[in-house]
Image: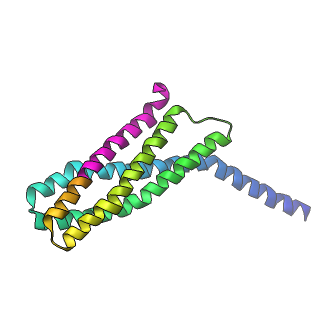
Amino acid sequence: MHADNRKVHNGASNNNDTIAMYLPSLLVFLHIAAAIIWIGGMAIMHFAVRPAVTQLLEPPQRLPLMCAILARFFAMVSIAVPVLLISGIWLMSLMMGSGGRPPMSIHLMAGVGIVMMLIYGHIRFALFTRLKRGVAAQDWPVAAAALGSIRKLVALNLALGTLTVAVAIMGRALF
């Protein structure tokens, strides 16, 4: 019976070792996947979808379509943002827990990421709400103004996201 307990203990220990070995890689994967969804989505919306829709459709067709597209995109970003936040904090805690200190580039990436999340929150909960109300009321000037504000803040967040990726990749060499 003592030998069976040892097997169970060793098995549990091996499982914990396996989790500890793969956890950082899993967290990095989730972090990068969430960033790709968010930053890539902003790029496609800003440089492809919006210009094409603006060129081809008048406001009564364009604004409801953009509202529907943004609703789907924001559903994905509303998952990506917490994944980024949780995985980033967890990765930093793993660095600090192993006696290390996150480099300045990590702190910069985290700070810019928090600013991006706050901007996203304003887009999602204030401006997008205005867009939806304008579209529902068929008040095209109100909807267009809200979409214009969203476009500007998405451009800002896209620039910040690109900066964050650059810092993540080149940060240790720069700082």
Q: Is residue 79 left or right of residue 66?
A: right
Q: Residue at x 25, y 49 (%)?
A: 152
Residue 42 percent location from the top left of the image: 30, 51
Is residue 158 inside the magenta stretch? yes
Of residues 60 and 26, the one drawn nearer to the viewer in this rendering:
60
- Quadrant in the picture for residue 77: bottom left
Dominant SS in magenta: helix
Residue 109 percent location from the top left of the image: 46, 40
- Quadrant in the picture for residue 49: bottom left
Q: Can you name the residue that lies furthest to the right here? A: 2
Of residues 125 and 100, the one drawn nearer to the viewer in this rendering:
125
Residue 166 percent location from the top left of the image: 39, 35
Q: Residue at x 8, y 62 (%)?
A: 58
Q: Is residue 30 visible?
A: no
State whether residue 71 is above or below residue 122.
below
Q: Residue at x 53, y 53 (%)?
A: 86
Q: Residue at x 38, y 49 (%)?
A: 36
State whether residue 114 is above or below residue 125.
above
Q: Say which quadrant the N terminus sits in.
A: bottom right
Q: Is residue 163 left or right of residue 82?
A: left
Is residue 97 inside the magenta stretch? no
- Residues shaded magenta: 151-175
Q: Number of marks in the image?
A: 0
Of residues 135 and 12, the one drawn nearer to the viewer in this rendering:
135
Q: Is residue 11 left or right of residue 88?
A: right
Residue 63 percent location from the top left of the image: 17, 64
Q: Is residue 3 visible?
A: yes
Q: Can you name the residue that lies furthest to the bottom here? A: 137
